[in-house]
Amino acid sequence: MTRLATEFWVKAYLARLRLRGIPAFVTAHGDDSAGAVLVKLNTLDGQAAAFQRSFDLMSGDRVWAELASGAEPGVDAAISRQRGFDPDLWVIEVEDRQGRHLLDEDGLG
């Protein structure tokens, strides 16, 4: 399967969130064509979670795996460490009190 350019995927994801009335922002712009993506879910109550794409070794499918969760400062620290390893990394922050990030929907794997 052909890989989508990261910038195209990010724009499509942001549009899907916007259609549901879920605010989201690019907080770190990575490489347009091949950068990895981290999604931070901020529930606006001091808690957050960060998700990264990985592979399910059993099925071979791309899945979103939790990188970190808990108090927002700790999640931010985990994201900062990842950015230190990968300067081409995109970070998208989703703000939703209900905890919606839509990453489990078809087409976002």
Image (cartoon, rainbow, N blue to C red):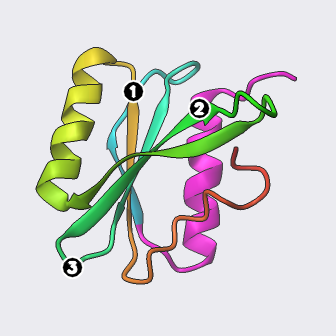
Callout 2 amino acid:
Ser
Which residue of the protein is positioned furthest toward the front in this rendering? 58
Callout 1 amino acid:
Leu
In this figure, which residue is indicated by the disc labeled 3? Answer: 45
Nearest to N terminus: mark 2 or mark 1: 2
Q: Is residue 102 above or below residue 84?
A: below
How far, Cα to Cα, is label 2 from label 1?
Answer: 14 Å
Q: Which residues are magenta?
A: 1-23
Quadrant position of residue 106 = bottom right
In this figure, which residue is indicated by the disc labeled 1? Answer: 89
Instruction: Write the residue at 29% across / 27% down.
Output: 82
Q: Position of residue 37 (x, y in %)?
A: 48, 35
How far, Cα to Cα, is label 3 from label 1?
Answer: 26 Å
In this figure, which residue is indicated by the disc labeled 2? Answer: 54
Quadrant position of residue 47 = bottom left
Q: Closer to us: mark 3 or mark 1? A: 3
